[in-house]
Amino acid sequence: MKEHPTHKVLLSARGFLATNSSEDLVMCIYRFARARISGEYRVVVEEERLERFARFITGLDDVKYAASGGIEAMLKKDKFDTVISAVPVTLRQALINCSVFIAKGKARFLRADLEKRLISETGFADIVRDIAKNMFSRPALNSVLAALSRRLRLEKPLGTPRSLIIETVNMCNLKCPLCPTGTGSLGRTGARMELSVFKKLVDSNLGVFLNTESIYMDFYGDPLMNRDIFGMIKYLKDKGAGHVEISTNASFPLDERKAREIVMSGVDLILFAVDGADQETYSRYRKGGDLSAVKEFIKGLVRMKKILGAVKPYLVLQFILMKHNAHQLQAAKEMAVVLGADSFKIKFLDVFRSDGGDVEEFIPDDPGSAQYVKKADGYEHKRSTGNNTCGLLWSSAVIMVDGSVVPCCTDARGRVVLGNVFKRGIEHIWKGEKYRDLRREIHRDKKAIPLCRDCPSQ
């Protein structure tokens, strides 16, 4: 097959180039098609909130995030084939329109040579039909309902959660100093969800699970502490669930049997928390972790993917940028390449969800690498606006290991419990009185809610 150059697309919410004409849209889809064949494609998002959307809309897991202020520099040094300027809903609609346009064979306005290339070179028509099908899938339509519900400020939303976070275990093998699980201050009894219980949860709420764009199988605990985690994921995927991912410290032994089980489970993405390029730096925060074991774990999965000819899981090495490890950022990127990871992700330290440990020890010295500014009474997120709104209440729900439903990932201790999935269905809780009261209160006075007072979500 003919080799194509790397195709680069920038998804922008601000506006560098408008894709209003039909030919622009067709060319955009054409590049998606070529990229799927060549395997040489790069998507960069301007805002972190677009990252999951970009993965969903393109079907690609390798989506880069350019930190705030980095887009202009990126445009100067890197040439992009396409710059799509649109907010998510606009971009989604643009692709829907383009997909329908092509699927119905209305590409006559295109130059004959381009039309021929679209059909013969890439199998374009079939790919566009797949894209169009995805656009009108259950998750896509449910996402539209979620966005509409938030825009209309509906206390009882249309549809069901766009994403679910499921805690299958609330224990961890490490002692990270800013994590309530690691410091033993979570305030909840350690527990694991049994496979039989998980299957019952899925079966009794199957419609909700099939509506989701993404399911995250971890919360305040490492999912690998549950021996049934990949059996759970396989059950979900066999039932028809979409994107399923986990985050782990991967400081566990991995043999060939376990590697095969992981790849065969169908898990779409695994994020590895690796915050250092040598053991000394790594263990400064990941206390009790073994970097050599983590490396072997990642290499073992890469090896098994090759043996099985599998594309997934997509392997992401995540590096939390902190004061003590900032000097190893480049070394960590190089380590990711050597290990065979598919992507490298920089994450900024989250003080808001910390356990009140010695935050000063870990916040980066470089102001540009810190999300928080110090105030007399603590820290404030740079994005804090004080707006009485929160998109999470219309898009995502968290299910704790005991079945309790809490509004978001900031509620580690279960202070705002909105129901229990072992007593009521997810949709019933989602549209129930407690959720409606919380949405109403958010719109009235967000700062009056202790859990939400300093949260940057908008």
Image (cartoon, rainbow, N blue to C red):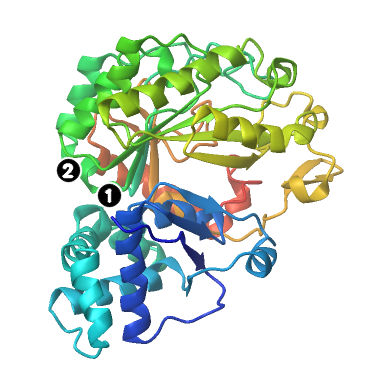
> How far apart are the two marked residues, 1 and 2, measured between alpha carbons?
9 Å
Disc 2 is placed on an element classified as: helix
Tell me: 242 left or right of 293. left
Residue 235, given in percent of the width and then of the height, sits at 20, 26
Residue type at mark 1: give it.
Thr
With 231 as the anchor, is 183 left or right in this view? right
Could you tell me which residue is drawn at 33 percent across and 84 percent down? 23
When asked about the image quadrant of residue 294, the answer is top right
- Number of labels in the image equals 2
Q: Quadrant of the N terminus?
A: bottom left
Residue 342, numbered label: none
Location of residue 76 by image quarter: bottom right
Q: For the point 57% across and 68% down, which residue is it?
A: 79
Q: Residue 207: give its label.
A: 2
Mark 2 residue type: Gly
What residue did someone put label 1 on? 160
Estimate the x, y position of residue 155 in percent, counting from the top left: 36, 57
Question: Which residue reaches farthest bottom?
Answer: 109
Nearest the eye: 106 or 154: 106
